[in-house]
Amino acid sequence: MSEVSENLHLAIIMDGNGRWATARGFERLKGHKRGVERVREVVEACPDLGVSHLTLFAFSTENWKRSEKEVNGLMALFRRYIRSEAARLFKEGVRVRFIGRRGELDSRLQDLMAGLEAQTAENSRLHMTVAINYGGRDEIVRASQKVAGMVAAGQIEPHDITEDLISAQMDTAEICDPDLVLRTSGEFRTSNFLPWQSVYAEYVFEESAWPDFTVELLAQTLAEFRNRDRRFGAVGTK
């Protein structure tokens, strides 16, 4: 469990890109492209704002339901982002990891993801995790299947199953739990994002759509979060 510190883990549901574009008469992909610019700004600002870990919800297992044009456009945008940002991320000391069902993504994107992970593996200024083709319940099911396999193989007994053992089978096994989960665009849902890991996280639901979420708003959000009393089931101190 993460404790309050200046080196916190911020997880973001980057919502509202498509609606932002539609409201301005643009195609939805225009909003996603604008959202990528916000990602660049937030990633650059995080270390100076005391954020050591950043997890971004880029594409959910449910997003395949969108139009073929939008899905293909998003996949192309992911590939373009990795190609254009790899050198910058490496130079800025960002370590990049990807979580989710990557095997269902196209091979070109998978290769780029693996290459970026390898290129930035020794970096530590900011640990950035990108959730692509990710669903929280799916992750829990996959982790449970691994644990069931251990039992079936006789490696462990059912009574050996603990929270730590399950956590170790998750996509996020090497990453600390989120301290703060932020969702933009005025929606009050968690949308199947990190349900296991976020049980003690604080939540902020921001009215602004992701393309309008500035570094200044991020700084205000973090300042408000740091004034909260996180009790983790104990008696509060404020």
Image (tube, rainbow, N blue to C red):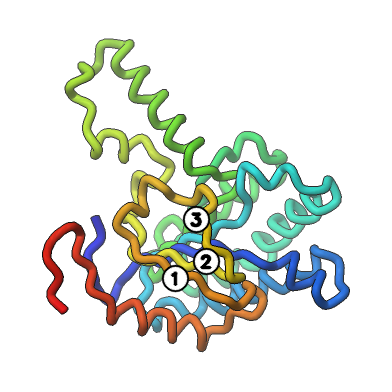
- The amino acid type found where label 1 is placed reads Val
Of mark 3 and mark 1, the one earlier in the sequence is: 3
Check disc 1 and report its element: helix, strand or loop: strand
Label 1, label 2: how far apart the Cα atoms are? 6 Å
Going 68% across and 61% down the picture, which residue do you hit?
Answer: 83
Residue that mark 1 sits on: 204
- The amino acid type found where label 2 is placed reads Arg
Of mark 1 and mark 2, the one earlier in the sequence is: 2
Going 53% across and 74% down the picture, which residue do you hit?
Answer: 206
- Locate residue 182, reporting x and y percent: 47, 68
Check disc 3 and report its element: helix, strand or loop: loop
Work out which quarter of the rendered image holds the C terminus and state it: bottom left
In which image quadrant can residue 41 be found? bottom right
Check disc 2 and report its element: helix, strand or loop: strand
Question: Given contact means CB atoms under 8 Å apart, are the residues at marks 3 and 1 in contact?
Answer: no
Tell me: residue 211, above or below residue 64.
below
Estimate how packed mark 2 is, as few (under 14), some (14 to 19) or many (20 or more) residues with alpha carbons within 10 Å: many
Label 2, label 3: how far apart the Cα atoms are? 8 Å
- The amino acid type found where label 3 is placed reads Thr
Label 3, label 1: how far apart the Cα atoms are? 11 Å
Question: Given contact means CB atoms under 8 Å apart, are the residues at marks 2 and 3 in contact?
Answer: yes
- Locate residue 82, reporting x and y percent: 65, 60
Residue that mark 2 sits on: 183
- Locate residue 177, reporting x and y percent: 33, 55
Estimate how packed mark 3 is, as few (under 14), some (14 to 19) or many (20 or more) residues with alpha carbons within 10 Å: some
Tell me: residue 221, above or below residue 63.
below
In which image quadrant can residue 111 be found? top right
- Locate residue 196, reporting x and y percent: 37, 45
Q: Return the mark for residue 140.
A: none
Of mark 2 and mark 3, the one earlier in the sequence is: 2
Residue that mark 3 sits on: 190
Q: Nearer the viewer, residue 98 or 19?
A: 19
